[in-house]
Amino acid sequence: MKFIGRIDGGLSTIAFEEVAHAINDWYKVIRQHDFSKAAAMREEIKNTLPNMGENQTVLLYFNLIDSRYKLMTENYNESGELLDEVKAKALEDSTNDMIHYYFYFFSGMYEFHQKRYVNAIIYYKIAEERLKKIPDEIEKAEFHYYLSKAYYRINQNVFSMTYAKIAYDTFKAHDSYKDKMINSEIMLGVNKLDLLLYEEAQKHFENVQLLAKESGLRLTESFALFNLGITYERQKMFIESSNCFKQALNIPEHLESFVGVRSMYMLSKVLFQLGAFEGARTWYEIALKKALDEGEREYLAKLNLVYALYAEQNDSEVRKNISVLDDMKLWTETADLSLEIAEYYKGKADFKKAAYYFEHSHFAKDKIIKISEALL
């Protein structure tokens, strides 16, 4: 990527059209999740901005794509701060549909990473209106993929699968987006898992693992192993499940990613369920440190809940951490965990506690239904 300057009054100035084109190319690289190339392009573009002919729209464009770059590199706070800074300018009536679209789309992505899934969908639905005017099928596939992820988080599996399939079909037609095609297949798998279609879900994850391994996509391969672990865990196949989580955690990219603490938590939980308390405590401690370091409030609550349930039999601590998830409005998590705890107490013939958690699971599911109705 080389910039050609022009001489204005003795100074070399770069045309803003040229910079805008470079930012567009940079965004394409970000969509492909090419971290090293995206980082290099960012620096090159950033260094040209002081020499660019004055154009506020191009500067706004750079900041919006930079917020997307920060989401990719998991610098979520910086991304949110940048979106706040550009909000007023981005939403001016004179600003074009593309700028409006990027602001709402990236704001939705930021809200998703903050686990505010309803807010994410609200932003996405506004972005969708602007997207209709943008003739870019890859951008539409990218949008549908992220919308699929958000609907999945509020248990709207039919909507999620519909958007995931649209994204999958588009990415499949473009060789340079193989990673995105594979990730779209993961979304198809996780939705089928929630619908208790275990064999179909497993086929998706096994296919993803094979494709990712062939393509050298180690992080994506680890996601497939993680989801296979969940598939086995849902079927009470705890040995197979623990093996999948261990394999995922043996992949350095997975260990360092946002999914790392989730795999540690699940491995600890599965080992507790197997009665392998020494290994379970070891992974609990490792996961707890990572969750504390990353400020992962959700997984701190889940880890403390699981430890209180299996290692301490401390029901007041279990209820305290369920309340944390309630406060975060993570109703899907609350519903699933409450049901699991209810079944645990039922197996112990503690029917009073079991009844409480069965009832709380239904309460959380009612919340999901009300939220879903409000969005549709």
Image (tube, grey):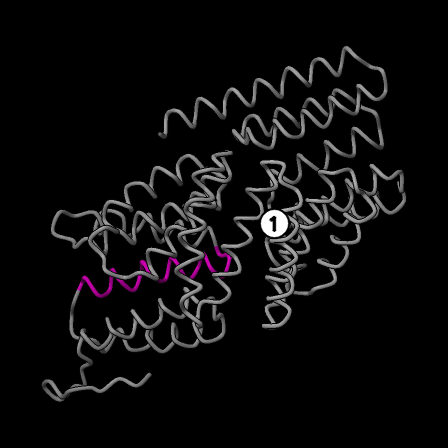
* Magenta span: 56-75
Q: Residue at x 23, y 57 (%)?
A: 134
| Quadrant housing residue 141 | bottom left
x, y percentage for residue 262?
66, 47
| Quadrant housing residue 256 | bottom right
**Is 66 in the magenta?**
yes
Horizontal side of 374 relative to 341 (left or right) equals left
Residue type marked 1? Glu
In this view of the protein, which residue sits in the foreground, 374 or 30?
A: 374
**In the picture, which quadrant includes the C terminus?**
top left
**In the picture, which quadrant includes the N terminus?**
bottom left
x, y percentage for residue 351?
79, 12
Q: Residue at x 40, y 70 (%)?
A: 29
x, y percentage for residue 249?
72, 58
In this view of the protein, which residue sits in the foreground, 59 or 362?
A: 362
Q: Which class describes the residues within 10 Å of circle 1: few (<14), some (14-19), or many (20+)?
A: few
Q: Residue furthest top?
A: 352
Q: Taken as a whole, is the magenta stretch helix, strand or loop?
A: helix
Q: Residue at x 39, y 36 (%)?
A: 119
- For disc 1, the marked residue is 294
**Is 357 in the magenta?**
no
